[in-house]
Amino acid sequence: MNFHKQRYLHDPENGIYGDCMRTAVACIMDLELDDVPHFLEGNPAGTEFNRRVNSFLASKGKQIFSVPFAADRLDILLDSLGHQNPDAIYMLSGESSRGVNHVVICRGGEVIHDPHPSNSGLIGPCSPDGYYWVEILTDKHEVPAL
């Protein structure tokens, strides 16, 4: 896995939208950052953002499988995921200490990489939906076992 730091830090007041998702995808797929589009460029609505992610992944024979988790504590969620899936590599979305939604990379029950230069990780679930999101990249023809 090639660990990168995100190039664009979220600063919407100045028209800059963070690229943590792009960076996490590049890391997991062992790609260079410039080989993955900046999905949030121009601040697309949720459905357009998802279309961009899915379109890129499909072009690489991949898909994303996302599962929301209603958890009060991140440590308990990570412990559970690690117990059930000790070797699984996945993205985890939640809220950062900067007050914006953010993506980190996990293996089993631990965060192994934070694309943000601060390495401050996640402090709570995403807003406004209140969920942590576990996102797994799979081959396009596979359906992950639950």
Image (tube, grey):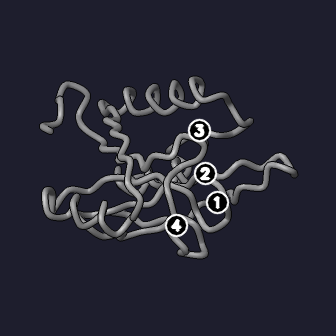
| N-terminal-most mark, 2 or 4 | 2
The image shows residue 31 at horizontal and vertical percentages of 41, 52
Callouts 4 and 1 close, C-beta under 8 Å: no
| Element assignment for label 3 | loop
Q: Which mark is residue 123?
A: 4
In the rendered view of the protein, which quadrant contains the N terminus?
bottom left
| Snapshot quadrant of residue 60 | top left
The image shows residue 140 at horizontal and vertical percentages of 25, 28
Relative to 124, say whether 101 is above or below.
Answer: above
| N-terminal-most mark, 4 or 1 | 1
Give the CA separation, mark 2 to mark 1. 7 Å
Which residue is denoted by mark 2 in the rendering? Answer: 19
Give the CA separation, mark 4 to mark 1. 22 Å
Of labels 4 and 1, the one closer to you: 4
On screen, residue 138 versus residue 111, left or right, reads left
Three-letter amino acid code at the position of disc 2: Asp
Residue closest to the eye, 80 or 98? 80
Which residue is denoted by mark 3 in the rendering? Answer: 39
Callouts 2 and 3 close, C-beta under 8 Å: yes
Q: Which mark is residue 87?
A: none
Q: Label 1: few (<14), some or many (≥20) within 10 Å?
A: some
Three-letter amino acid code at the position of disc 3: Phe
Q: Label 3: few (<14), some or many (≥20) within 10 Å?
A: many
Which residue is denoted by mark 1 in the rendering? Answer: 7
The residue drawn where x is 60% and y is 24% is 48
The residue drawn where x is 52% and y is 48% is 22
